[in-house]
Amino acid sequence: MEKQPFFYDITLRDGNQSLKRPWNINEKEYIFNLLMNLKIPAVEAGFPASSEMDFDTCRRLAEISPENVTISALARTVENDIIKAIEAIQPAKKPRIHTFIAMSPFNMKYVLNKRPDEVQKIAIEAVEFVKSKLGKHADIEFSAEHFGDCFENIDFVIDSFKKVIKAGATTINLPNTVERTRMKDFTDLVEKVYNALPKDISISVHCHNDLGMATAATVESYFSGAVQLECALNGLGERAGNTNFYEVAVALHNSGVDVPIDLSKIYETALIVSDMSQISIYEKAPIIGPEALAHRSGIHQDGAVKTKDMEKGAYRAIHPSLIGRKDDEKLGITSQSGKTAIYEIITRAGYPFTLQEAERITPIIKEAAEKAGELPTCTIIDIYFKEIFNVKGAFHFEKLEKIKENDYILDFTHNNESFETEGKGNGPIDACLNALKTFGFEQKLIHYEQKAIDDDILGAGATAMTVIKLEAPNGKTVIARGRDENTAEANVKAIFNGLNIISKMN
Ligand code: KIV
Ligand code: ZN
């Protein structure tokens, strides 16, 4: 069984340093509390040598940090950085110093302008210096910056790791400082390091998302031996950002790994962090994006609706509640959508409707969407009212008058020709159908239901709803509805709606 992943948050350091307006001490404290709610066990609070504000923030977070949370500060492999970092995190119950130097051939030559043996010496001395200050139980993280570019000199890098471990490093961090190539190239290097180092050393990965593979690289690195995963809320970080914490946590959870994080806080946290960083969550962002749970094609909508209450959904990676999303899977109605989604939208809105009716009005809704693009729910409901309760067609009901018991006069038009006829029958429905029969419009009533409407959902004044099933002369059946404050009128309206539906079917 794998070890539980150890999440090391870098939002307040790598994330913060990339913001157009870095957070102040209060804002950082606010984010820190969000991290505590998520149950993140280690936080890189800042880079104290970079500014007075960062120094003060690290100190503040160290002061308020709970006893089981590691508070880390970043320092280059230079004495002054290390002294400042140690001073800043001293109040923490579990302090850590994170020191780093580049080890890729390219960076050593062109940026540091140093030979590998010089770089290695600096690294070892820096770690020794931290240890001399913090004592034998010092928690020291060492990073070989640009590790992802160390294919050619990996043996040198591993040798350096062994030496910094001897000097006191307890965590070896492998940054993909710039993501340039295949994810597997990186995870192969991670595995090589894991195999070469003592097993009591914690291997860490820190991935940037330059090519969009940081989540994958981090998840796969975990399976290659990295137990510490450096991630940022909302994927904040330099350039295209760091590894997105939410995606990694959920991907590992979905892979059956025990993730010791409160996943249900993810969605809320993401919205707050977006607000505070002034970086919006893009529409298609995995799991937290406004569109991440939207379905527009009929096939997807059908699968989504059929599995909506199940933990595993036909067309979603997670149940929204896993990350605390209250909104259900969104069904967007476009020309690509299907009857299941339309049925779902109208019934969710509380209106009486059947799947058969949905099938009938779906082409009308899709036609409207073809012209207008995605339709808002109010437009769908408008179409519903028109096509269910006020079906336009050849028949038009004018009036029904009771002249005596079981005897009615019915006025209507058919193709604009007016008709007035007497109909006898057991109640208005029967009389109306008999009256229509005398003009050759014969329909068979196969189901009748009368419903009182108590909450006025069908519009002002509508207190009665009739639902009927009619069989047309060709054997087809349709469901039709009528609504009115008068039950008899609701009945007859249902018949005329049914006649118009049938006449359009022929
Ligand atoms: O990306 C990087 O290499 C870093 C190091 C400081 C770990 O942020
Ligand atoms: Zn970084």
Image (spheres, rainbow, N blue to C red):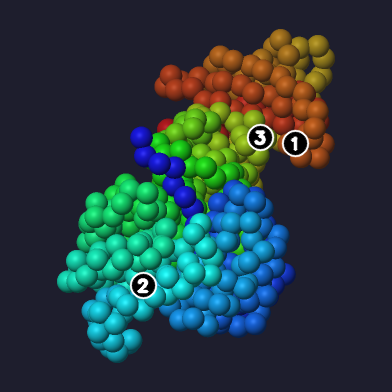
User: Callout 3: few (<14), some (14-19), or many (20+) C-alpha neighbours within 10 Å?
Assistant: some
Residue at 26 percent of width and 58 percent of height: 193
Residue at 65 percent of width and 51 percent of height: 67
Which of pointers 1 and 2 indicates the residue nearer the eye? 2
Tell me if label 1 and label 2 are in contact, CB under 8 Å.
no
Residue at 58 percent of width and 44 percent of height: 262
User: Callout 1: few (<14), some (14-19), or many (20+) C-alpha neighbours within 10 Å?
Assistant: few
- Residue 375 at least partly seen: no
Q: Earlier in the sequence, mark 1 or mark 2?
A: 2
Q: Which residue is mark 2?
A: 124
Residue 206, above or below 369: below
Q: Which residue is mark 3?
A: 351
Local SS, label 3? loop
Q: Earlier in the sequence, mark 1 or mark 3?
A: 3
Specify whether 471 is left or right of 386. left
Residue 249 image position (x, y, % from top left): 47, 48
For the residue marked with disc 3, what is the amino acid? Tyr
Residue at 76 percent of width and 12 percent of height: 406
Specify whether 209 is left or right of 488. left
Tell me if label 1 and label 3 are in contact, CB under 8 Å.
yes
Local SS, label 2? helix
Local SS, label 1? loop
Is the shortest distance between ligand 2 and the CB of mark 1 under 8 Å?
Answer: no
Residue 170, above or below 427: below
- Looking at this view, is 474 or 196 the one in front? 196
Indicate the quadrant where residue 175 lies.
Answer: bottom left
Q: Which residue is mark 1?
A: 457
Task: Compute the Cα span from label 1 to label 3.
Answer: 7 Å
Residue 198 image position (x, y, % from top left): 31, 51
For the residue marked with disc 2, what is the amino acid? Ile
Task: Compute the Cα span from label 2 to label 3.
Answer: 72 Å
